[in-house]
Amino acid sequence: MSAIVVRAGPRALGRLRERGLRAEDVAIIPGAAGGPKALGLNGLDLALFGDWLPKSPRVRHLIGASIGAWRFAAACRSDPATGLGELARLYAEQRYPPRPGAALVTRKVREMLCALFDGHEEEILASPGLRLHILAVRGRGLLTRDAGVRRTLGFGAAAFANLAGRRHLRHFLERTVFHDARERPPFLDDAGVAGNLLPAGGPAPIRFDAFHTHAVALDRDNLREALVASAAIPMVIEAVPDIPRAPAGVYWDGGLIDYHLHLPYSRSEGLVLYPHFTDRIIPGWLDKALPWRRARGEWLDNVVLVSPSREYLARLPFGKLPDRNDFKRFESDYEGRLAYWKKAVAESERLGDEFLAFAERPDLSRVLPL
């Protein structure tokens, strides 16, 4: 039984046929939003960042939204295996009363991030080979405040606008990339746009799709706030206001625009290696219920996507990766949820082992089109 599925865009498949899958070719690694699903990729992350990639050091761009940003911040610690292990443990051990309020969840999230990253800020921001980029969204219109009725109306209107067309979501949300101060990710390499200045003298928003995209350099003052904002699910975690160095406003979960990170990766000459929860790329969080809203096109030409197989998932408890619904499923059974999630983490070692075996001797007959 195969534990992983490998899909590749046409340019990536050509590279695999010519050279095989080499760590030295990997320039970008995306990390999707998805909350507890990340626990089910822990073994794959450990194989990548603790074993395979360090053997071929080079500059690599890690681009994450929500839990994807947390995974990559952990991987940027000087000991990525320890960072990723602590993330899995602390995330799995979260404990809440029934129907917790946003204030409590926000406090718990901040405590978890403190435990993970306090004292490690400099090593994350100065990682020799890794460049951390964190995605969040900035509210517009009704969503310029995180306030009860206004917020509910704003996200309701945003959902209807998105149903009519993803481009209409731009009236409610803007993308913000909190990027490594040393180097922007390749998909922001658009000097013809990024070099323009607003009348006030600040940088103009970058446009590579329907959304305004703000580029903000990461530093010690905004790293933690960017990580919280990137995972601030509306009504679940409080929005983060006025992040240092970023445009004034309130910031929410980066997955609202970039759920599975459909970005112009083809601007990079290197491979994009995408360890993902599923073999489908859904552009935005509001597109989950829209089966026709699937990423496609030239942006994915150089992407190699690695995900758990259906056979692997079928053998997990409940036949799936952990997800946020488990908090409700195990509302009165903390120990049951913890055991289930720990089982998913332990099983994920198989994903890492099979990836390493595939990378050592790629069987291109297994590679499916992306």
Image: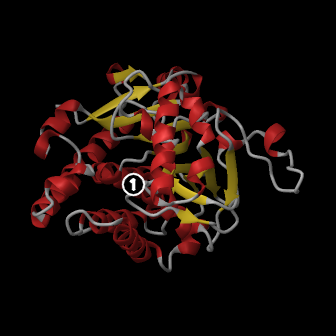
Name which residue lies at 25% across and 33% down: 309
Quarter-of-image position of residue 212: top right
Quarter-of-image position of residue 49: bottom left
* Front-most of residues 205 and 79: 205
- Which residue is label 1 attached to? 51
Is residue 257 toward the left or the right of residue 342 in the image? right
Identify the residue at the far front of this view.
149
Q: Does 205 sit above or below residue 165?
A: below
Q: Does 216 sit above or below residue 265?
A: below
Q: Does 74 sit above or below residue 111?
A: above
Is residue 282 toward the left or the right of residue 213 in the image? left
Is residue 365 toward the left or the right of residue 132 in the image? left
Q: Does 324 sit above or below residue 159?
A: below
Name which residue lies at 62% across and 66% down: 243
- Rendered-image quadrant of the N terminus: top left
* Front-most of residues 202 and 37: 202
The x and y percentages for residue 238 are 45, 64
Name which residue lies at 59% across and 30% down: 167
* Front-most of residues 331 and 116: 331
